[in-house]
Image (cartoon, rainbow, N blue to C red):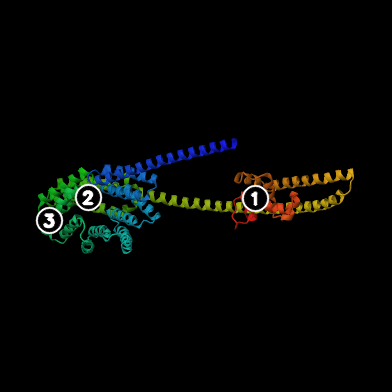
Amino acid sequence: MINLQFLRFRLNKKAIAIFYTLIVTFVVCNLHAQNKESLLADFELAKANKYNKPDTAIYLFKKCSDGFMLLGDTTKVIRCNIEASTLHATKGNYSESYDGYWEALSLSQDMKDSMYTGSAYDGLGVLYGLYYRHQEALANFQKSLNIKKSLIASKQLATTNVVNTYYLMAINYRDQGNYSKAQTYLDSCYITRKEAGNVGSTSYIDAEQGYLLYHNNKLQEAEDLLLDVEQSFLSSNESYLVILYSFMGDIYAKMNKVDKSSEYYLKSLAIAEEFKSHQNFVPDVYKKLGDLYLSINQPKRAYQYLEKSFNTTDSLFGVRNANNRKVLEVKDDFRQKQEMQKEILEQANVTELKQEKRILFLRNTVLTIILISSILISVVTFFYLRHRHRVSEKILKNKQKIKEEKNHEILELKNKELTSSALQLIEKDQLLIEIKNKLSSVKNKDLKELIAKINANSKHDWKEFDTRFTSVNQGFYKSLSEKFPELTQRDHKLCALIKLNFSSKEMSLLLGISIESVHTSRYRLRQKLSLDKGENLTEFIAKI
């Protein structure tokens, strides 16, 4: 009755534990789901605000990236990093943009997500292009293009996904002055979209096409096309007007419509200031205004805008901006752009600005030398320490291996000695049993005492064997008890003899039982150890 009540108590206790576990699991899963829903809502809000409120969008993308990382959703983390990096680039935060794209690239490569790997390469290509590292930019675009074409061929990606990369390559070639190559890639955009059924808007492609028409002196066609797409950006992405109005200012400047050109340049700057977007265009627009006023012989106004161009360029790309210290490897080619600006300013007799540029050049040179020296010292130190660590680790592993091998050999030797000693005890016990059997038929008080001593000696032999076994195989009984607490002391004895590979007959003599009892004990031991029919008991015990 008591056992039955105890069993009921244990069952009730177990049921309660399971019930509480289910409640906790449900609550945790529910919180997890709510957190994910909240992050998805923030992600959609960030996408909705990325054109009109880029700072808010960047904050939300960063928040979502951290949240999805905790949830283990790496794909969402990559998407957040790419979106945030794109916004950082438009705001002139090139260091954050650079880091974000590289983190996205690393994560996407680790999880073998080729689609986002291509997007990360596109972003890095844009950054290299901003620093006039066009070869590196094109190399990244080509990697993206190869990945996307491979995914399209395997039906994992829609054909239109290559349009963005073609578009970026067209811009890169246009920036280099290779307008025929730029037109080729822009044509690829139109052709790919047409093959896919002309889904979506072509505003961005049309805007770039208008600028290529300008470079080919088809000014009226260029003006008409850009005016046509203006309304599209006013309703969908007003911040892009920074670029569009800059293009239109160029067209009117070439038409010698100075007032109209100036108007659109100033509108471009106003949009850039309002949305804090496409900051990389701001220095060029200031420079174009300076050139414009220089062409109509207004050197004072020209100087004002050229100075703003220089200062804005320096704040965006210069070494003094802490945001961009991590991307100094792209400074050399950009310095050539600064030298070109210096020549223009010299022609306008801007003496004060010339002196400032000399100081900047010297400062950049010194900082570059210091940076290169620091990198070289760091690299040498790193490889030296890594080599030392590897050598030390190898020596330690070898010592550990030798020690383990030595310990194993000692254990083997002691177990052999123990086995030999036990076999000698068995032989002695056999002899004593034979003597006892012969003497047991004789009725003599002294002989009976002798037989009792023989029996006591057998028990003493086992204790001596057990003590020696425990000293050699330290922790064996402890491991057995921890893994299989239901084993008895008799089971422990049997395990010890199995470990030393004794036969059933030798076990029966040491344990003082029959061979049949040994077989029965082995069978019961297998059940307690939960061994399958195919598992070898001796091999299992040997591993403990």
Callout 2 amino acid: Phe
Examine the rendering and report whether any part of residue 163 can be seen: yes
Residue 320: image quadrant is top left
Give the alpha-carbon distance from disc 3 to disc 2, as whole Å.
20 Å
Mark 2 lies on residue: 281
**Label 3 belongs to which residue?**
223
* Residue type, mark 3 in image: Glu
Percent position of residue 529, x then y: 61, 50
Residues under numbered marks 1 and 3 in contact, where contact means CB atoms less than 8 Å apart: no
Q: Which residue is mark 1?
A: 525
Q: Residues within 10 Å of mark 2 (few under 14, many from 20)?
A: some
Helix, strand or loop for disc 1: helix
Residue 228 in percent (x, y) is at 13, 54
Q: CA distance from mark 1 to mark 3?
A: 93 Å
Q: Nearer the viewer, mark 1 or mark 2?
A: 1
| Residue appearing at x 31%, y 64% in the figure | 153
**For marks 3 and 2 on the same chain, the one whose residue lies earlier in the sequence:** 3
Q: Position of residue 280 (x, y in %)?
A: 24, 49
Disc nearer the start of the sequence (1/3): 3
Looking at the image, residue 525 sits to the left or right of residue 244; the answer is right
Q: Secondary structure at mark 2?
A: helix
Camera-side residue of 193 and 222: 193
* Numbered disc 3: secondary structure: helix
Q: Earlier in the sequence, mark 1 or mark 2?
A: 2
Q: Position of residue 221 (x, y in %)?
A: 12, 59
Q: Nearer the viewer, residue 66 or 213?
A: 66
* Quarter of the figure that contains the N terminus: top right
Q: Amino acid at mark 1?
A: Leu
